[in-house]
């Protein structure tokens, strides 16, 4: 009887070409092969057509002198095209990061003004939003540029506050805060202060949980950090001894064989893949044992292991330059750090340089002492900041209005001040609603900086246009633009999503 049952089960099994599992795997592998083949075919055809049209697609301009100077940046006389584009990237990042910070501050203030019971503040906030967001950004940038260009010329007594705030047709010059000789030694003390402040905060939170009293953990931690930072302002030279161990670390890294780094990278890639597979299986493990895996689960496991093997082969055999770059960069990093300690670096950690006016020849100009904002930078900076702040203000207003009214009523019933209710109750809850659209505005601000080409500011777009006008390498330069803005956008998205996950409500 048992033999008959086993025979019937064997005969009822479908052939392999009708087996669901086999069909799934064959279809997925076939589709993957078709996609890769289509991409290879399209890339080959595009390359052949470009070569037939004599359109250059190489990147040799990155190592060739571009033959032009830049109006501003970390290097005004770049020796290669790659260096020139790097200067443009730094200029763009400076504007984007500073613009995001200032636009957020202005947007929050304007948004709260629109929610204010004060008639004047409410109308000022409403007028700002309605005017700024309905005027195209490019028009605003050109407006600011023309305003700066028509200001009075630079003189030895340029104002409006000579020695502190200079405003002229050369742009804007304000005091510049900068790190000084003792900054890195002082940072060590600040790190110690952060550890102590975190310890004090945890202790105060513990006491608050036990007693129910308000121990002010945040204020206590900030007070400890402030005291330690002030003490470190005077004692930071004691950390000058770090010069020697950091230099020894740099020399030790330079002695590491390159193949050892390649092997470590390959093993790390494989270990990460194995760790992912183990966590993947643990997530599907039931109290009685491992749950039955689906065909898709097997496909994920095989794909992860195969990908790790390919990456390990790449770093171990095909791309030895990565290991060499890691060794050289790490060694150079610790060499630079060692130079920041000792060798007479006993001065104040931070310093401020006031703007000044110098005259070389017949015409006075801003000196290098202050923080000088050229017409192009100022026009684009104020344009993207004020324009983005108008949208952020509406996001803030919407986020605050989305908080249930009962929250503020409960806080008022407890006798809390209006400022305390806003700071402790409303804004923390509104932040959950505001973060996703705020991320979109940050992305828009970073990409809108490309309009700097309209006023001649040396951002990556303006410099890239000059490079391809001289070399004819339009496609390579455009591809660098795309990669740069893609990297910026993905980085901003990762940061915003990180805080978005941290602030979301955890449900049971």
Image (spheres, grey):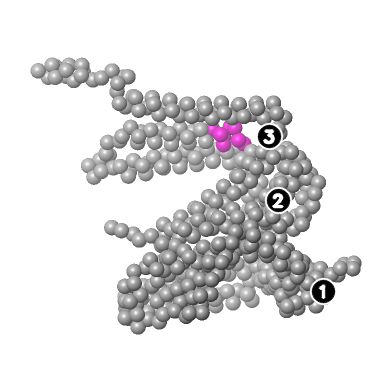
Residue at the limit of the structure toward the left, as seen here: 1
The residue that mark 2 highlights is 462
Distance CA(mark 1)–CA(mark 3): 49 Å
Tell me which corner region of the image, top left, top right, bottom left or bottom right, holds residue 128: bottom right
Q: Which residues are magenta?
A: 313-320
Q: Which residue is mark 3?
A: 57
In this rendering, would 234 be left or right of 130?
A: right
Question: Which residue extends farthest right?
Answer: 361
- Between 487 and 289, the residue placed more toward the observer is 487
Q: Residue 387 location in percent, x, y?
A: 58, 63
Q: Residue at x 60, y 45 (%)?
A: 483
Residue position marked by numbered label 1 in the rendering: 155
Instruction: Assess disc 3: are there few (<14), some (14-19) or many (≥20) residues with their C-alpha within 10 Å of its C-alpha.
Output: some
Residue 220 located within the stretch drawn in magenta? no
Q: Nearer the viewer, residue 187 or 134?
A: 134
Q: Quadrant of the C terminus?
A: bottom left
Identified at 62% across, 29% down, the residue is 46
> Which mark sits nearer the N-terminus, 1 or 2?
1
Eye-nearest disc, 2 or 3: 2
Q: Is residue 317 magenta?
A: yes
Q: Is the residue marked by circle 2 packed among few (<14), some (14-19), or many (20+) residues within 10 Å?
A: some
Q: Position of residue 284 (x, y in %)?
A: 30, 42
Q: Main secondary structure of the magenta part?
A: helix
Q: Earlier along the polypeptide chain: callout 2 or callout 3?
A: 3
């Amino acid at each position: 009887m048992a033999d008959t049952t086993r025979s019937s089960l064997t005969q009822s099994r479908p052939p392999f070409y009708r087996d669901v599992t086999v069909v799934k795997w064959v279809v997925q592998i076939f589709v993957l092969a078709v996609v890769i083949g289509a991409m290879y075919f399209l890339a080959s055809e595009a390359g052949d057509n470009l070569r037939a049209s004599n359109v250059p697609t190489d990147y040799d301009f990155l190592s060739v002198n571009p033959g032009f100077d830049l109006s501003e940046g970390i290097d005004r006389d770049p020796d290669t095209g790659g260096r020139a584009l790097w200067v443009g990237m730094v200029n763009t990042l400076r504007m984007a990061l500073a613009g995001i910070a200032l636009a957020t501050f202005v947007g929050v203030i304007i948004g709260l003004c629109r929610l204010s019971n004060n008639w004047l503040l409410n109308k000022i906030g409403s007028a700002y939003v309605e005017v700024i967001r309905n005027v195209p950004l490019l028009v605003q940038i050109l407006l600011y540029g023309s305003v700066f260009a028509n200001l009075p010329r630079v003189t030895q007594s340029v104002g409006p506050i000579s020695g502190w705030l200079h405003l002229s047709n050369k742009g804007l010059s304000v005091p510049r805060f900068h790190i000084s000789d003792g900054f890195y030694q002082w940072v060590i003390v600040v790190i110690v202060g952060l550890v102590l402040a975190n310890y004090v905060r945890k202790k105060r939170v513990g006491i608050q949980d036990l007693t129910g009293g308000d121990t002010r953990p945040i204020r206590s931690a900030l007070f400890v950090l402030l005291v330690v930072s002030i003490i470190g302002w005077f004692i930071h030279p004691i950390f000058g001894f770090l010069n020697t161990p950091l230099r020894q670390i740099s020399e030790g890294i330079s002695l590491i064989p390159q193949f050892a780094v390649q092997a470590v990278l390959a093993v790390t890639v494989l270990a990460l893949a194995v760790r992912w597979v183990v966590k993947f299986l643990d997530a599907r493990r039931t109290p009685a044992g491992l749950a039955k895996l689906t065909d898709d689960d097997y496909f994920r496991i095989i794909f992860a292991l195969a990908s790790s093997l390919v990456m390990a082969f790449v770093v171990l055999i095909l791309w030895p330059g990565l290991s060499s770059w890691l060794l050289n960069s790490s060694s150079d990093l610790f060499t630079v750090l060692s130079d920041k300690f000792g060798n007479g670096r006993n001065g104040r950690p931070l310093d401020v340089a006031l703007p000044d006016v110098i005259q070389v020849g017949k015409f006075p100009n801003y000196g290098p002492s202050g923080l000088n904002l050229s017409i192009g930078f100022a026009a684009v900076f104020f344009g993207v900041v004020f324009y983005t702040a108008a949208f952020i203000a509406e996001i803030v207003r919407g986020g605050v209005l989305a908080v249930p009214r009962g929250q503020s009523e409960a806080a008022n019933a407890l006798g809390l001040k209006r400022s305390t209710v806003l700071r402790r109750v409303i804004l923390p809850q509104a932040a959950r609603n505001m973060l996703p659209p705020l991320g979109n505005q940050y992305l828009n601000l970073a990409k809108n900086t490309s309009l700097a080409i309209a006023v001649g500011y040396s951002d990556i777009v303006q410099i890239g246009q000059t490079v391809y006008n001289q070399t004819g390498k339009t496609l390579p330069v455009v591809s660098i633009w795309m990669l740069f803005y893609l990297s910026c956008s993905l980085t901003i998205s990762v940061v915003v999503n990180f805080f978005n996950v941290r602030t979301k409500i955890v449900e049971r």
